[in-house]
Image (tube, grey):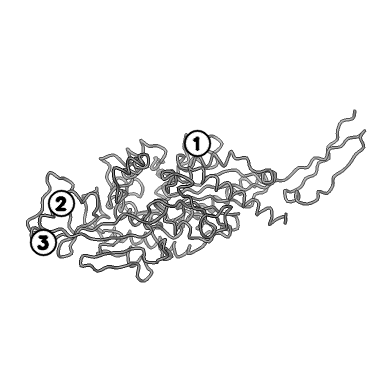
Amino acid sequence: MPAERIHRIDIGWQDLFKPILGLKTAPENDPLINQIAIRKETLPIILVPGIMGSRLKRASGGDKTWDPDANWFMLSRFGLPHVDAKDRKNMLVGESSHRTGHLSVDPDNAEVPEPGRDRGWGTVAWQHYGSLLGALAGHEWPTTLDVCFDLPVYAFGYNWTDSSHASGRALADYIDRVIDEQGRIQPCRQVILVTHSMGGLVARSACKLHGAESKVLGVLHGAQPAFGAPAAYQRIKHGFRELDGSLWDWLCHPIRKISDTLTERVLGDEGPEVTLLMAHMPGGLELLPTRAYRTNEGRAEWLHYRGRHGHSLDLPRRGDPYDEIYCAKEAPFRLIDPRWLGATSAGEYDQMKAGQWGDYIENLKVAKQFHVSLGHYSHPETYQFYGTALETPDRIEIGCQKFSGRQLFDLQYLEGKHFFEFRDAHNQVIDTDRDMYLDDPAAFEIPNRWHTESIWAYAVSPPTGSGDGTVPDASGRALAARPSFYDKGPNGTVSIDADDENDHARTHDRIFNTATARHITIKVIENLCKAKIRRETGA
């Protein structure tokens, strides 16, 4: 019997949806096989993580600086009792304020499997994103997609202390490199971006401000603070410690409470510690509410302040949080206490230096300009999801409590849990550690001059809004988005609630570890690929 002959026909994937020309027939005694070779297209998937989700090292010397996967390293460098706020700042920012080039991305992570090391997987926190990267890389895509596209999975770590404008430029360059790398193998014209939290700002920056939009097929944003989050204000003001909490919370959510406690130790459980870091990080300041931010009820005024004589303010009154809140230096609702910019440890403050306040204002200007430049922009093919139904500050309430006479002695039991600032009858800020020794109960005392005066203590009220614990619903769903494959929220946005995942799983930093988020991600990628097929073939 004669050997079978092979007739090869090369077609592009688009031709699969048309009649295939050039097929040949042959008699039985001279068999012929028509072999159709399909030129597939590569659509790389790039994960862009959230703030603190990238591994960092010193640009000079290469010493590891930030590695969320190395628990002992993080605790020893940031969380042990002898590590103070100044040490943390020097690690992440340097001795002065932010400067470009102080840190770079660290790609060397031994936990990352070999195939992902050349695709940036080592640059991101494996404990937060490893399950997603593995699920995408190992997913069996539907046959229609599989014969048309290759979908390699990449990750893009970035210096989250820097402005998202600079990180967006780096992402745009990375997209070019990935397209060039894959394009040497087979056609590759666009990528798909999957973002978490701050990564959404970086991706939007790359698309709008650095010319990457046409090279991006579509974007999925998960838990993005599209117009900022009041939680950023609250944590700078009050630290990462909880505003409220009980033994019952610990009994109901022990894993989450332990994790939150570790976060407090690493990043700072008090306002002075967090302020010294965030005031010198443009990237951190870019998470503050922008002019476009609205509460879950749709109000532009997200800060309610109740003063000592019963008067109250709802801010921003003129729609400018930068001038009215973030640049304020004297009012109790100010974002930054100038004394805290010179903190050497929690409870020990240097007096403000003009240069330190000036550095903060320059970083704030960078954040404001980025917000203005980015505006309401979203990629034309945008999908989004967010966690909901967890207590989240969508608005901030600050009030004060008056202490007089014998009530003053109650301060030693209340200060650590509730109050961020104390003022005397002349509205002067009281240094509680120096004047009352609040950090040392054995030495606690009330100076004689206050026995006949009153003290006002200022506090942030516990959150009552809905969100994922960090990003409120309104900001997570703020962008115009494509209708999703199943629509639980407005504007085509998917909300992940208690019916989908438990309270611990759907919190802001853990949400991409959930089966629901992975399912959403896979379905969105499928939708984008199918839309591309329809667009290019009319099928």
- Label 3 or label 2, whichever comes before in sequence order: 2
Q: Circle 3 — which element?
A: loop
Q: Nearer the viewer, residue 3 or 143?
A: 143
Q: Residues within 10 Å of mark 1 (few under 14, many from 20)?
A: some
- Point out the frontmost of discs 1 and 2: 2
Give the mark count: 3
Please state which amino acid type lies under the numbered disc 2. Asp
Please state which amino acid type lies under the numbered disc 3. Glu
Circle 3 residue: 453
Residue lying at 17% horizontally and 51% vertically, measured from the top left: 433
Q: Circle 2 — which element?
A: helix
Circle 1 residue: 112
- Label 3 or label 1, whichever comes before in sequence order: 1
- Point out the frontmost of discs 3 and 1: 3
| Picture layout, residue 112 above or below residue 292 | above
Residue 330: % across, % down: 24, 64
Q: Nearer the viewer, residue 322 or 505?
A: 505
Circle 2 residue: 410
Is the C terminus in the top left, top right, bottom left or bottom right quadrant? bottom right
Residue lying at 45% horizontally and 65% vertically, measured from the top left: 372
Residue lying at 60% horizontally and 58% vertically, measured from the top left: 214
Residue 99: % across, % down: 38, 53
Q: Can residue 59 be seen here?
A: no
- Label 1 or label 2, whichever comes before in sequence order: 1
Residue 216: % across, % down: 59, 54
| Picture layout, residue 267 above or below residue 280 | above
Q: CA distance from mark 3 to mark 1?
A: 61 Å
